[in-house]
Amino acid sequence: QVQLQESGPGLVKPSETLSLTCTVSGGSVSSGSYYWSWIRQPPGKGLEWIGYIYYSGSADYNPSLKSRVTMSLDTSKNQFSLKLSSVTAADTAVYYCARERGAGNGYDFYFDYWGQGALVTVSS
Amino acid sequence: SYELTQPPSVSVSPGQTARITCSGDALSKKYAHWYQQKSGQAPVLVIYEDGKRPSGIPERFSGSSSGTMVTLTISGAQVEDEADYYCYSIDSSAKRVFGGGTKLTVL
């Protein structure tokens, strides 16, 4: 059974960088069959895709966040990470990591496993 | 930017059929997937590739697609099905997009 677990500071100051790590068990971030993604949800609001990273290190990000987002992989620890720079109160959210797999048609994707989520509050 | 449009809320009585729609220009060419999110919990996949049900998801959950609209149907909705439901798909640039979510009330 695949499990994902987010970790990182729960409080970040405005203008600083938010950093989160997702530890994967029961699966490998080195697998070419999956994409490793981050999704966030501001309090009381809907889900927003942040981006994904692939085993090769290639990544793609939501255009609305692209200038502030960096994702990376640590295959030795079976982890992937998110950095979001220059945060403001609008970045306060529950951050989820998730595994994404390809659909049967070969060009669609969906998330099949999610972490439990980590609340990150941006406040001084 | 690409948008998936869902009704903000749907309400049914227990045992009735709940239908939640999601519309988007690319849905005639792209799969849609549905997630259930109960209060304080992570989303759970309930339907993938328009109408397939993951193992462990009750048979009362089904999905269908027609043109640029997809529909999640819960036949004989139960109180425990009360949750937020999100459709999800990919735009023409392979950017991932969620619908705004629909709050299902069963009472």
Image (cartoon, grey):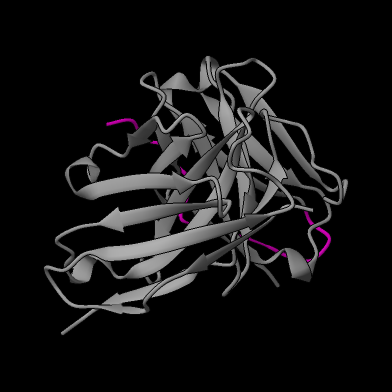
Q: Kindly indicate the quadrant of the structure image that contains residue B19.
A: top right
B51 up-or-down from A121: above or below: above
B63 up-or-down from A121: above or below: above
Using the image as rendered, state which of residue A17 and residue A94 is in the foreground: A17
> Could you tell me which residue is drawn at 39 percent across and 29 percent down?
A58
**Residue that protrudes farthest toward the front in the picture:** A76
> In the visual, does B86 lie left or right of B19?
left
> Could you tell me which residue is drawn at 36 percent across and 73 percent down?
A120
> In the visual, does A40 lie left or right of B37?
left
Q: Kindly indicate the quadrant of the structure image that contains residue B16.
A: bottom right
User: Predominant secondary structure in magenta?
Assistant: loop
From the top left corner, tell me how far across and down residue A97 is, in percent. Answer: 51, 55
Q: Which residues are magenta?
A: B1-16
> In the visual, does A100 lie left or right of B90?
right
Magenta stretch: includes residue B5? yes
From the top left corner, tell me how far across and down residue A16 is, in percent. Answer: 16, 68
Magenta stretch: includes residue B14? yes
Instruction: Say which quadrant the C terminus of chain B sits in.
Output: bottom right
Instruction: Say which quadrant the N terminus of chain B sits in.
Output: top left
From where the camera sits, is residue B65 visible? yes
From where the camera sits, is residue A47 visible? no
From the top left corner, tell me how far across and down residue B98 is, in percent. Answer: 45, 43
Q: Kindly indicate the quadrant of the structure image that contains residue B77.
A: bottom right
> In the visual, does A97 lie left or right of A1?
left
Using the image as rendered, state which of residue B1 and residue A62 is in the foreground: A62
> Could you tell me which residue is drawn at 76 percent across and 70 percent down?
B79
From the top left corner, tell me how far across and down residue A78 is, in percent. Answer: 58, 51
Using the image as rendered, state which of residue A89 and residue A21 is in the foreground: A21
> Could you tell me which residue is drawn at 60 percent across and 69 percent down?
B41
Using the image as rendered, state which of residue A89 and residue B78 is in the foreground: A89
